[in-house]
Each structure stands twice: as structure tokens, then as C-alpha cells.
Amino acid sequence: MHIPDGYLGPATCGVFYALMLPIWGLASRMVKKTLSVKQVPLLAIGAAFSFVIMMLNVPIPGGTTGHAVGAVLVAILLGPWAACIAITVALVIQALLFGDGGITAIGANCFNMAFVMPFAGYYIYKALSYKSAIDSKRRVIAAGVAGYLALNIAAALTGFVFGIQPLLHHTVDGQSLYCPYGLKVAVPVMLAEHLLVFGWVEAVVTALVVKYLQKSSPELLKEGGQ
Amino acid sequence: MKITTKLMIGLGGLASLSWLGLWLPEKFKAGSAWGEWGPEEVGELVGYVPQGLIKLAGLWNAPIPDYAFKGWEEKPLFDLSLAYIVSALIGILVCVCIVFLLGKVLSKKE
């Protein structure tokens, strides 16, 4: 889901940077208001967790690869604004140090994976776990469903961003200048592979960690819940 | 044990398994992630290489490209798996350091 350099035209890259700048600003202000000093180590672990879970590529044999993002888990534990900061750090490091995701596409990649995904997942989790006990099974299922759906929402959005490129930028003879696949291919493909395979990885990882924390550190599930 | 210590150990576990993220796709001939092909691969897929893609694809020279050390492109999978684990550890370290610094600036004082 890391869009590389050269797949998005300058207009798209610019729009997403312009969208992300105020979001990053707001995230900083929100985190400043809500994040306590003792939550900082957890936030650092959250960013590192997202970084490394994105390296664990899962193959679709003979086809393609994909991975979980971990954004929903971080959002459940620290809130969506803090998750936005953590996932942004992971994505920027992946782009700058490892060339995973383009530098022109950092705005777009952050919008999909560091903004839309943690927010979607957080509110799905909140809705599904509404008034459930901290140690309830419903909370584990809510975390899994939120992970699954949020990754797919981010994947569909990534497909959409890929897919509008041929409409926006093409030569007179119809060759695309950037991503060559249009909406009719990009959205269904991105969605199908995440619905069938990668979404389940996100679901299982998110649910298992929540289940583990219910036993070993239930206060973390409370704090994220306020 | 503190929960952060336990989670750090979990992270270490994930890092030591990270090579699977390189090895499994290779063994199952899974190819690139969708939409993350290099320019030549795009050329094979659609019959032409988009001009903008040619121009921008090499824009950024990452110090550890694709989680492998520079000049290691032809190394065997075992070596690349080691580089992948080292990359995971570097990434974790840098993430933790940057968020700690950010957290110092951003978190509310108590």
C-alpha cells in the first residue's frame, strides 16, 4: 500500500501534502493536550510495531504481496491522533531510509495509512465495543473487525488514488503518464487482495494483542477508551 | 515485568521473524506488491513505461534501498534475509528515538 514515486502526478501529491499538513498540525495539538509523559514509551513502541509489521509481507502465491499496518491497534491503545503521529513516523522512515513508498507520495500514503485507517478503525472499535467490559470477548472481536475493515478502507482509498491517475494525466495517444491502471482495475484489485488475505492479518494481529492486553495490562485498554 | 518491557520483547520477536516478510514472497513467487513495481516491470505489464514514472521513479536514493544494503542486489536470499533483519532493527531503533523526542515536545507536562 506504499505508493512509490512516479505513480502519482504532481497535482495528487500536492493535494495530499496540503491535506496532511493541517492534519499533522492538529494531531500535534491533540496529542499535546491528551498524551501523558508516561504514555510516550507506548507511542514509541506503537510506531516501531507499525514499522516492523509493515515489513512482514504476506504472499499471495504466484500473485502479489501485502501486509498489515498496525494502525488500528495503536489507535485503540493511544487514540487516533496519537496513532496518526506514530504511523506517520513509521511511514516517513520507511520512505526516507528504505525507499519503501515514494517521497512525493508521503502525503498520500500518510493520508491513507496514518489518518483514514486509524480513525476508521478507532471509531469502528468504539462502536462495536460500546459499553462492553474491558475483559469481554466482544472487545476482542471489535478490535479484529475494526482492523479488518479499516485496512480495507485504506486499501480501497489507495486503489482510488492510483485509479484516478490515468484520468488526470495522459498523453494525446492515451498513454498514462503515471499509474497506468484506472479505477476499474486499481480499486477492485486493491480491495480484493486485502479483503481476501491481508485484512485477515490485520484482524488477527489487532485482536490477539487486545486479547493479550486484557489479561496482562487491562488499564491500557481503559486509557485508550476515554 | 512492566508491560512496556514485555511489548519491547514482542517487538524483538517480530524483528527476528521479519525475514519471513522477504523469504515467503520469494518462495511463493509472489512478485511485487500491487502498484509498487519498478519501471521495467510496469513496461512488461502494460506494454509501455509511463513517462512520468520514468522521470520520478529514481527521484530518491534511499540509503538502505528495499531493506537491503547497497550493492547487495545479487546476493543470495540468506544474506538478504540478514540485511532485512538488520533493517528491521534499525527501523525500530529510529522509530523509537524519533517518537521519544517528539513525545518529549508533544506530551503534556504533569
Image (tube, rainbow, N blue to C red):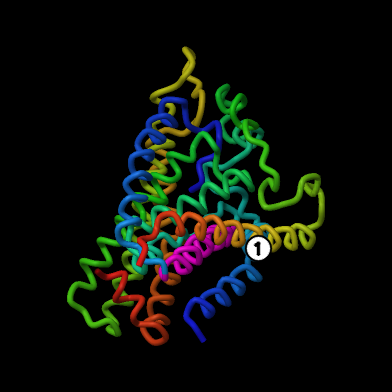
The segment highlighted magenta reads A38-61
Left or right? Give the position of A43 relative to A54: left
At 19% across and 72% down in the image, what residue appears? A130
Residue at the spot 32% in from the left edge and 67% down from the top edge = A145
Q: Residue B79 lies in what quarter of the image?
A: bottom right
Of B34 and A145, which appears nearest the observer?
Answer: A145
**Per the image, is B84 magenta?**
no
Question: Relative to A90, does residue A52 appear above or below in the rendering?
Answer: below
Tell me the kind of residue under disc 1. Leu
Horizontal and vertical percent for residue B84?
69, 59
Instruction: Answer left or right for A18 relative to B13.
Output: left
Dot 1 alpha-carbon crowd within 10 angstroms: few under 14, some 14 to 19, many 20 or more: many
Q: Main secondary structure of the magenta part?
A: helix
The residue that label 1 is drawn on is B89
Which quadrant holds the C terminus of chain A? bottom left
Between A198 and A18, which is closer to the camera in this rendering?
A18
Image x and y of residue B73, in percent: 77, 47
Is A222 left or right of B11, judged from the image as shown?
left
The residue under the point 40% across, 55% down is B106
Q: Is residue B93 above or below residue B49?
A: below
Q: Secondary structure at mark 1?
A: helix
> Image point 44% across, 22% down: which residue?
A169
